[in-house]
Amino acid sequence: ALLAPAHADVVIESIGADDRPTRVVIGKDVARIDRSGSDIHVLIDLERGQIFAVDDAQRYAMDMRSPMPSREEHGELNTEAVPPPAIAFERRRDGPVIAGFATVHYRVTVDGRHCFDEYLAPAALEKPAIKRFVETMAAGSRDDARRVLIQLTEPERLCEAAEDLIDDHYPRLGIPMRTLDAEAQLVHRVTRVALDEPHDAALLRVPADYEVLTRSQLMERTAPALDHDELLERQRNIERHMREHGGNPPPQQF
């Protein structure tokens, strides 16, 4: 098995904009993210920094740290030529207590544009397992080519493009307990945090008989069954939902 057995001692439950529950189980060296109704879950090796999207229906694990396949029609983008947007977390006021943790309300802007309101819990980072989880997630796969492409062609989606960069602030400021978009619509809300809840170690590792595939290998296997851009977007959906601390995509077949 790729991931060593471990017993979890932290559970974080949350809901998203669609009211579907998500459960994050964090052990000493391994974490798992499940979303209700999905065949896909995410396993994170906190010791090695590995992240896998595990499809139980298709019996494979996709290495999410492997390079994102490029879009041939766009060629090779020079990501260094386009500087990343400026991310700012403006502290507004103390927020409410959410799932037992005091929060701080931040207004998040990207190049001066209001993107989100975040209610972050700094005290949650005092739990080593949570801090390690947040740090590993923040250091996860970075899709600079997508960010640059959006900056150049769809600046109205700048908030979405900058989500990877926004993540980098959580290990310093606190874990997101509630996130609202610029229209004050709910993106994510933590409903429960348990700091000592044993869990089945077998659920925290990739089954030995599952194939481990890179993004490119998965692309080659499924082509031409799925459109190239559609597959890339499905892969990116995994990262997008992971950022919400409970997050994998709705049920789907690669």
Image (spheres, grey):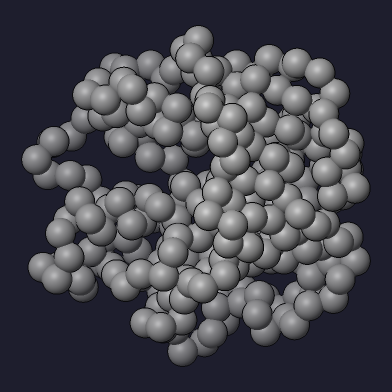
Residue 91 image offset from top left, x and y in percent = 74, 16
Identity of the residue drawn at 81% across and 37% down: 121
Identity of the residue drawn at 60% across and 16% down: 88
Residue 228 image offset from top left, x and y in percent = 17, 56
Question: Seen in the image, is 41 located left or right of residue 122?
Answer: left
Question: Seen in the image, is 157 located left or right of residue 102?
Answer: left
Q: Quadrant of the N terminus?
A: bottom right
On screen, 174 above or below 10? above
Residue 113 image offset from top left, x and y in percent = 48, 14
Is residue 47 visible in the rendered image? The answer is no
Identity of the residue drawn at 45% across and 56% down: 238
On screen, 204 above or below 161? below
Residue 71 image offset from top left, x and y in percent = 17, 44
State the residue lying farthest toward the bottom.
209
Say which quarter of the image contains residue 214: bottom left
On screen, 240 above or below 74? below
Nearest the eye: 10 or 63: 10
Nearest the eye: 97 or 151: 97
Nearest the eye: 124 or 116: 116
Question: Seen in the image, is 136 located left or right of residue 25?
Answer: left
Identity of the residue drawn at 73% across and 33% down: 119
Q: Quadrant of the C terminus?
A: bottom left
